[in-house]
Each structure stands twice: as C-alpha cells, then as structure tokens.
Amino acid sequence: MNKANLGRGLFILAIAGFFVFRYVQLSGSIYLFFIAAFGIAGLLALINRLPLRWQNVMLNLGISLFFLDLVFAEINWSEFAAALASANYWWLVPSTIMIFIHLYFRTVRWQWLLKPMGDVPFWPAFRALNIGILGNVVLPARAGEFLRAYVLGRSTSLAKTGVFATVVIERIFDGLTVLLILFGVIIIGVRNETLQRAGILGAVLYVGAMGALILFMAKRHWADAIVHKLLPQKLADFTLGILDGFTSGLAILKNPHYLGMALFYNVLTWAVIPVSFYFGLKAFDFGTPIPWPAPVLMLPALALALTIPGAPGGVGLVQFAAKLTLDTTFAGLPVAANFAETVAAASIVIHISQMGPEAIAGAVSFVIEGLSTSDIQAGREMADEPATANK
C-alpha cells in the first residue's frame, strides 16, 4: 500500500469519525451525508482506488467543514440572519480603504526587497502582488506565490527564481511580525491555549526558515558542492542556475539600508490591518464596546489559521479564527444574548470584506496584464522550467 495514500486515507477517515461524533452529539441529518462521503472516500484512498486529486479535494473540504462546524453547528439561524440584517455595513467603507492602504505599503515593501536586483516600478509590482493574492485564494498549495513571481518576471528582466526568493523573505517577515503581535497580546494578559501553541509552532517554523536562508547565503558553496556531488553534470548545471537566481533575490539580507527600509514598510503594512478589522467589527452590536485586543489578536489568529490546508480562500479557517479571537477577547464582558450568532455573522462579513477587495484588485490586474490560463499553469510550474531560471 502507498504510504502517502495510507496517510491521506486515515486522515479522511478521521474526519468521518469526527462527523460520527457530531451526529451522536447533535443528531443533525447532514452529518449522515458527511459520514458516508468521507467514510467511502477514506476507504477508497486506503485501497488506492481514489485518484490523488480527489483525495486532496476531500482532505481540503473536510478540514474546512470541520472548522465551519465548530462555528455554525449550534447557533440559532434566525438570530444569525437577524445579526446580518441589522449590521451597519457603512463601516465596511473605511475598512476597505485600510485594505488598499495595506496593499500600497505591501507593494512598496516588495519594491525594497527587489531593489538589489533592480528598480521595479510600482504598478507592475502592485499588479503582480494582487494576482498572487488572487492565486492563493483560488489555487491549491499557495500556488499564487509562484504565479506572482512569474508575472513580475514576465513583465521585467528580473530572474523569476530571484523574484520568488524575495517572496520567501516577505513571507518570513509576515510570519515573524504576526507572531510578535501575538506574543505582545499574550504578554499583556490575553490568554488562549490554542493560540499559544500555534504561536510556538509558528515561531519554530519562521525563525528556522530565516536561519536557513541566512545560513544558505553565508555558506552557499556548501550547496554547490552537494549539488555537484549528488547530481549529473547537466542536471547540476541547471540546478545551480536556479540557485543563482534564487540567491540574487536574497541579496537584501546583505544590504542594511534596503533591509531597514523593507522592515519599516513591513511595520506599516501590518499596522493598518487591525484598524481594518476594527471598522469591520464596528458593523455589529456585540452588546458591549469592542475591546481593543480583539482586532489586534485577530491578525495573528487569521494568519496562523491560513497556514492550515483547507478549501480555497480559507473558508472555515477564517471563521474559526474570528470566533476564537472574539470569544477570547470578549470573555467576562456583558455581551448580547445573541453573541454567538453575532460572532458567526461577523466572521462571514470579515472574511468577505477582507478578501473581496483583494480578489477584485487581483482580477483587474489579471486582465490588465493580459494573462491567460496558460500563464497560470506556467506560474505553477515555474520551478520546473529550465528557461525560467535565468529570465
């Protein structure tokens, strides 16, 4: 039996087991459908009768349904509809403005990360950034990061692998920033064991990744020696070409001025997102004023949730992170009787209001760049194409 299929099959069966538990607990008839679907899919995966593509679909769908169930299974749906109907959606106007300010700062930050490779104009970088964000929403395995590097490399003379290296650095910056925010909120007294464990795991991941990049830059000759030793000459030359392009994108780590400017805009990039969350939350009546840690804690909660594989766009993951944040920060306060339903409604609106503007900007950028489905495929396969290493 294929070990990968075994692991995926057991995971899918575990999801089916969760729905068995929820059926016993809540008796919802929808759980019978989930039990049958995931039970059959898990068994077919175990006996190698379910194609890999469908195994991944069931895994991602199951993860999203798992988290959606934790948010919506026990709410009163009429109260949920009432919370949505009574929301003051005018607050989404300043929330959306903050998102576009975030995208502006994020683009400028990327320009500084790219500076050791060359000066990149704002609009090509802005469009590539938004196309990448859209790609992460609709494509699996965060393929939007490769698509973003492909698009900017396509419109400039920069090596696509070098551009992708700057995206890797940016992602590490993002991870370390949201973890610092999380630890700051924890230090001032907001406690949640789930977030604390996620923060520790995230710290190990992102600090380790940054350490690996620094070591790679300092000891690049080690990588060259290993490649020459393990690979045939032709494949070694190709691999070293990719490494050369990737190394060019890490050059900012050796330039204190460029690195300092990138870090400055990194702070601005993430400072505006909690403000956007605050305006989005203001649309709802929770029965008490919004505590200031709520929009601040929501940033690392959502960021950590979106590192979990799930359905495109983070469906379920965002809703659970929002609920976890609001339940934690409103704990002990005199909240409204329909607080759970208001939280569920807010989680939907926060999700749409945050990702909607970015998705629209990405779609417009996609059209302006004149891209096609073949470009999407080329972006996803960028690392496998010899020609992209030096273009």
Image (cartoon, rainbow, N blue to C red):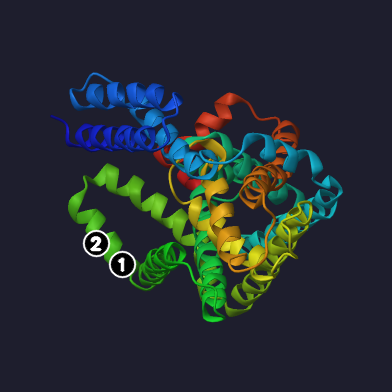
What is the spatial separation of the Cα atoms under label 1 and label 2, in whole angstroms? 6 Å
Identify the image quadrant of residue 138.
Answer: top right
Circle number at residue 119: none
Res 180 visible: yes
Vertical order, 305 against 222 (above or below): above
Could you tell whether 32 is left or right of 260 in the image?
A: left
Q: Who's the residue at 24% across and 21% down the image? A: 44
Q: Residues within 10 Å of mark 1 (few under 14, many from 20)?
A: few
Residue type (three-letter) at the residue carrying disc 2: Ala
Q: Residues within 10 Å of mark 2 (few under 14, many from 20)?
A: few
Is disc 1 placed on a helix, strand or loop?
helix
Q: Are marks 1 and 2 in contact (CB under 8 Å)?
A: yes
Vertical order, 176 against 3 (above or below): below
The front one of 265 and 95 is 95
The front one of 223 and 77 is 77
Residue 133, percent from left and from top: 62, 45
Is disc 2 placed on a helix, strand or loop?
helix
Residue 189, percent from left and from top: 54, 79
Residue 293, percent from left and from top: 64, 70
Q: Who's the residue at 64% across and 45% down the image? A: 341
The front one of 29 and 337 is 337
Res 387 visible: no
Q: Who's the residue at 69% across and 61% down the image? A: 273
Reading the image, the residue beneath label 1 is 221
Reading the image, the residue beneath label 2 is 225
Residue 98, percent from left and from top: 78, 57
